Image: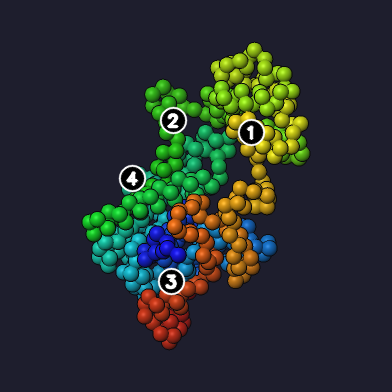
Amino acid sequence: MNKLPLEGIRIADFTWIGAGSFTTKLFADHGADVIKIESADRLDALRGSRPYAQGVPGINRSGYFADRNSNKKSVTLNLKTAQGQELARQLIETSDIVANNFTPGTMEKFGLGYEAVKKIRPDVIYLAMSMQGSSGPEHKYLGFGLTIGALTGLQFLSGLPDKEPAGTGTNFPDHIPNPCHAAFAVLAALRHRRRTGQGQYIDVAQTEPTVALLGPTMMDCAANGNVGGRTGNRHPAAAPHGVYPCQGVDRWIAISAGTEAAWSGLVAALPEVEGLRAAQFSTARDRVANRDELDAALAQATSRYDADALMTRLQRHGVPAGVVRSAEDIVERDLQLQHRNHWVRLQHPEMGEAIYNAPPFRISGHTETVRWPAPLLGQHTDEVCRDVFGMDKAEIASLRLKGVLT
């Protein structure tokens, strides 16, 4: 079997919660040795986040933490002690990448800011991904995914017309734009180092990748003075474009038929719906202008169908359509995910068998997968002390008694 692409790369991982943990997981999935530095005194908030396996709370039982931290090792260090900070520096000396997503100034309090770290490892790639970057009038503001969504305009644009902003919870900023942009920047820095021998300081302001997603909205505002607004599932220039009811309780289907080809397919797939052939729906412009009537006619038609059967029917006619699936649908009945071996089942020491998302891509010649489950808190402390720091059992026990290893 070929080596994974990032085997031989080590990351000293000081990240926590969502965006940072997902960023370093991307590297772990590609074979990097990711050593997560944790504290038993101040836990990663994800360790206390639902869902818990079998509904039983515990610091090693969070499914949220498990899915964002598989393929990693966990070491518990007390960074408030001089010896804990020295051990962190020793780990950094052997690491290619140092990653954190703390508020600016936090790593400096521990003597682990970039200027200090590059004296230990001059070619280090140092990733700092705070909410608003390392400088500026708001750079020390606190926040999570919800805050980022609010500050960037995502919250303002998300939801139903004439309703309060609904947003996307923490999911979107924390788990899509920010980890992917951060990981891409680190990969670029690795390539730069390979060519020049130079390290890099990477300053990711998590608001900025999220703003970048809203490019058309920002351009419309700059060019035309339009501030946008909440449109629900509708598209400003295409109809039908929405979610429509199907048979059963809370069963729905998403349909996007904005092109002439898709519209023709929709009409052909639902020949019994005479209303779709009305003159007021003849052109794309007509359909946008009369979208209320179109949505009502389409909803009346879809409500007579089973959602999965209708999706199959519409897709056969070239209509982009998808069942609005629940978590149960996705885990238990999604044939496409099953075909691609998306779900990986692993035994966890406390949770028992649990499912994990496989890396969402396939690279020829490699087998990226979840190799081991998320670590127990401090599971690899002794291993790292022995193999990286060169300690014996007595030294490890002494540091544990002193509270350096928590």
Q: Nearer the viewer, mark 1 or mark 2?
A: 1
**Could you tell whether 36 is left or right of 87 in the image?**
right
Q: Nearer the viewer, mark 4 or mark 2?
A: 2
- Which of the two discs, 4 and 2, labels the residue nearer the N terminus? 4
Q: Earlier in the sequence, mark 1 or mark 3?
A: 3
Of the numbered discs in the image, which one, if any, rests on residue 316? 1
Residue highlighted by disc 3:
78
Q: Nearer the N terminus, badge 4 or badge 1? A: 4
Query: Is 142 drawn above or below residue 371 in the view shown?
Result: above
Task: Give 66 or 228, whichever is nearer the viewer.
Answer: 66
Q: Nearer the viewer, mark 1 or mark 3?
A: 1
Residue picked out by circle 2: 216
Mark 3 or mark 4: name the one nearer the start of the chain.
3
Give the label on residue 136, or none. 4
In this view, the residue in front, 362 or 292, is 362
Element on which disc 1 rests: helix
